[in-house]
Amino acid sequence: MDERDYQEFAAVLNRCDKEINELYHNYALRHQISDAALWIVYAVHEGDEGLTQADLCDAWYFSRQTINSALKKLEGAGKLCLVPAGHRRKRICFTPEGRAWAEALLGELLQAEKQAASALTREELRQFLDLSQKWCALLRGKMEPQNTAERIV
C-alpha cells in the first residue's frame, strides 16, 4: 500500500470509528447517563448478569476507576446491585427496577443495531467481524510494547 492509499484508508477508518463512538455517546446523553454507565448496562444485559467489575474492565477496555464510579452511581440509583461471588469478587446484577429500566433504555439501541446488521449479508457480517478482530490484533501488536522495559513512564 502506498502512502496516499494508506492516508485515505486511515482517515476513513478513523472517522468511521469516531462517528460510531459519537452515536453511542449521543444515545447515552439522550438518556441522561454516562458512556460508561451505558456500556455497563449493555454488557450486563447482554452477558446474563454474570460479569464482575474486573470482567467489565477487561472486556470493555474501561479503567477500573471509571467502572467503579459508574457502578456506584447505578447502584445508588437502585438500578444495579453487587452480589458476592468469591474472594473479593462481586457479580453485577440488575435490581428488579433496574432490569425493567435496562430493557427500556436498551430497546431502541438494540433494535437499531439489529436493523443495521440485517442490512448486511451473513457473509458480510462474518467478514466484518473477522477483519475487525484481525485489525485490532495487528494494531495491538504494533502499538503495545512487548516488553514493559520499553514503556515510557
Image: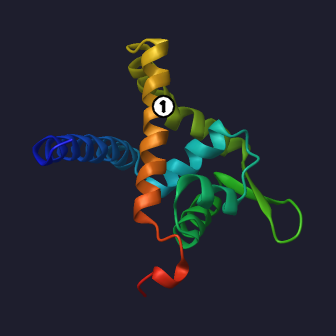
* 20 relative to 37 in the view: left or right: left
Q: Is residue 147 left or right of residue 25?
A: right
Which residue is pictured at 44% across the width and 14% down the height? Answer: 118
Write down the quadrant of residue 85 in the picture: bottom right
Location of the C terminus by quadrant is bottom left
Q: Is residue 74 something one can see in this rendering?
A: yes
Q: Secondary structure at mark 1?
A: helix
In the rendered view of the protein, which quadrant contains the N terminus?
Answer: top left
- Please name whichever residue, 2 or 97, is drawn nearer the observer in this view of the structure: 2
Specify the color scheme.
Answer: rainbow
Q: What is the x, y in percent for residue 21?
A: 34, 47
Q: Residue at x 49, y 28 (%)?
A: 110
* Count of numbered tags: 1
- Residue 65 position, x and y percent, is 55, 73
Residue type marked 1:
Leu
Residue 48 image position (x, y, % from top left): 73, 39
Residue 27 vs residue 8, the one in the foreground: 8
Crowd band around label 1 with a 10 angstrom C-alpha radius: few (<14), some (14–19), many (20+) = few
In this view, 119 is above or below 10: above
Left or right: residue 97 versus residue 134 is right
| Quadrant in the picture for residue 131 | top left
Give the residue drawn at x 52%, y 58%. Answer: 61
**Viewer-closest of 109 and 1:** 1
The residue drawn where x is 40% and y is 54% is 139
> Most extreme residue toward the right, as rendered?
86
Q: What residue is pinned by disc 1?
A: 129
Above or below, comparing residue 86 to residue 40 in the picture: below
